[in-house]
Structures are given as structure tokens and as C-alpha cells.
Image: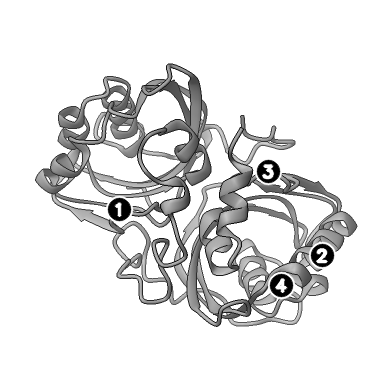
Amino acid sequence: MNAPRSESLRAPASDTGADTSASGPRAVFARYQQAVLANSADQMAEVFAPDGVTEFPFRLPGVPPRVEGREGIRAWLAPAVGTAFRFEEYRDVVVHDTTDPEVIVVEHSIAGTTVANGQPAQISYVYVLRARDGEIVHLRDYANLIEGMRAAEGMGLGTAASPADLGGRGDPADLGDPVGRDDSAVPDPVAEPTTPREIYAALVRAIVAADADAAADLYAEDGVLELVFTRPGIVPRRQGREDIRAAARAGWDALPLRFESHRTVALHDSPDPEVVIAEFELAGTSLAGGRAFTLSMLVILRVRDGHIVHQREYVDVLRIAAASDRLPEVLASLTP
């Protein structure tokens, strides 16, 4: 289960001006849920537009970064849906409306049964979904890969996954597609950032600089940081500026990676003026093996009085492990 939220990051739909029509993104997501729970590749594909696109910023070996077209999506889903894991119930669904009436961001988990051994399991996701005329035109699917590996026994992943399998800077992923606008409105550095966009920009610069103090100072005294996709041994929730500062210092000092640049894939403004949702990439070099890497991330920030009061962070844990030459250790930690 995801860590409990101490404060809602979602405004009630009635207060957001969201498109709640039968063709709006919320209704389209509801149709997609029904198709998923039917474990039907055909039904899932039919929710997409003929030229719809799905992307996988976090992915395991053998998963393409991008699948295009309804028929391409159908062909991709057909051999996979229901074969290793049967979807049975949506849980912890939180829908974030955005100021773009076509786009929603959905945090959720899907519970079900592992086909190989009949054991229950759960996989967490974030979808960034653009719907138009009652169909999905673009879906970015951020999945918890560790939960996915646990749920999909017998798929030949495990030790077969290597740093090369998990990709590097040469990855063909093109994440700057129509889910988000080409965001030239990311603020330039300011001395005292206050708005959610300014705070996001300051935060990602602090991450690239591995500056724990600059990052921690962006949080409120009682601010909360939740690491939603995590692995054994990592504390999933930090509360308080000084706790966040200490964790950032320890974590970045121990991480054998050097971040060198970042790219904002999309910034999604919320009808709630305190909230912004950012998709971005960090690029850098592994100090352990000298390999270049690119890491995708998604963060949901609530900013009040110029400080982060709540952050939910989604990161590709396996890619970090691969870039750090720690993949075998992390994979071993997943074995019961």
C-alpha cells in the first residue's frame, strides 16, 4: 500500500471546473478502468484513438518506450494482458485535474492475482492521460517496476535485467509529446521563489547540483516528502525540513551518480493554485562505471507561503540501481 497522505493534494472535482462530460478525461479513464478489470487487450485498445500513443517512462527489459496507434497498442497488449497477472480491483485512486481540460493525472494501484502461484499482489501507477472526443490520445504510464516484477513471476526478468537492459542516455524515448505543452514557461532562477512553478524550478536545480541545503530550505518546517515507488531499505516518508535535509545529505553523499542537467518534459498546472505536477528528466554520469544515464521522474508539489508543504515523488528505482552498479543487490533484496 502507498504511504498515507497527511494532506490531500487533490481539490474536489466540483471545485475545479474539470470536464466531467462523457467525453472528458475522467469519463475516459473510467472506461479504461473497466477494460483493465476485464483483462481484455481488445477493450483496452478500443479506448485509444486510432492514432493514440502510450509511453512508458519507467520500463523493464523488453518494454518499448513508446507504442503508437490503436492497432499497435492492441498488438502490444494482446500477449501480455492476463497472462502473468490478473487485474481485479483499483485502489487508492486519486485524480488530479489540470488547467488543461483534456489532461488528468491519476495516482492509483491495481490489486490482483499472480497467475504463476495464485498469490495476491498489487502494482502502483501514475497515469498522465490526455483524452479528446471520448478517446485516449496520449497516455504516459509510470509503473512501480519493483511491484510489477513481484507480481509477474516467470517473466524472465530477475537477474537478466542489467544496466544495459535498463537503458542509458541513448534511450530512444521521446517524452516531449502531446500530454504536456512545450513548456518554455519554466521560470528562470529567482532569489526567493514563491510560486509552485518557481519552487519546482529551484528544486530541480538543487537536485542537479546535489545541494541538500538548497533543496531542504524549499520545504516548510513541517513539510512532508513521500517516496511512493521505493525499495526495501529506503524510508518512504520524511517529515520536517531537518529530517529531509539529513536524508538528502546522506542519500546524495552515498549515491555514486553525478547529475549534470535536467529537462522539463511537462508542467501541469492545477486548478488548485497551490499544486503543480512536474514530469522531468535528469541526465548525468555514473561515478561507479562512467556510463551516461537518463532518469525520468514525476513529482506532485503543494506549495504554501513559498515552501513545499507536501511532495509525492515518483522515480525509477531500478534505473537508479542500474546506473549506480547496484542492480544485483537491489534485485536480491526483492527475493522473499
Question: Alpha-carbon distance for marks 2 and 1?
Answer: 34 Å
Q: Are marks 4 and 3 in contact (CB under 8 Å)?
A: no
Quarter of the image with the N terminus is top right
Sequence-first disc among 2 and 3:
3
State the residue at coordinates (50%, 25%): 121
Query: Which residue corresponds to mark 4?
Result: 193
Q: Amino acid at mark 4?
A: Pro
Query: Which residue corresponds to mark 3?
Result: 232
- Determine the secondary structure under disc 1: loop
Q: Are marks 2 and 4 in contact (CB under 8 Å)?
A: no
Query: Which residue corresponds to mark 1?
Result: 62
Q: Amino acid at mark 2?
A: Ala
Q: Residue 250, which numbered label?
A: 2
For marks 4 and 1, give the one nearer the viewer.
1
Sequence-first disc among 2 and 1:
1
Q: Amino acid at mark 1?
A: Gly
Mark 3 neighbour density, 10 Å: few (under 14) some (14–19) many (20 or more):
few
Lateral position of residue 38 relative to residue 194, left or right: left
Mark 4 neighbour density, 10 Å: few (under 14) some (14–19) many (20 or more):
some
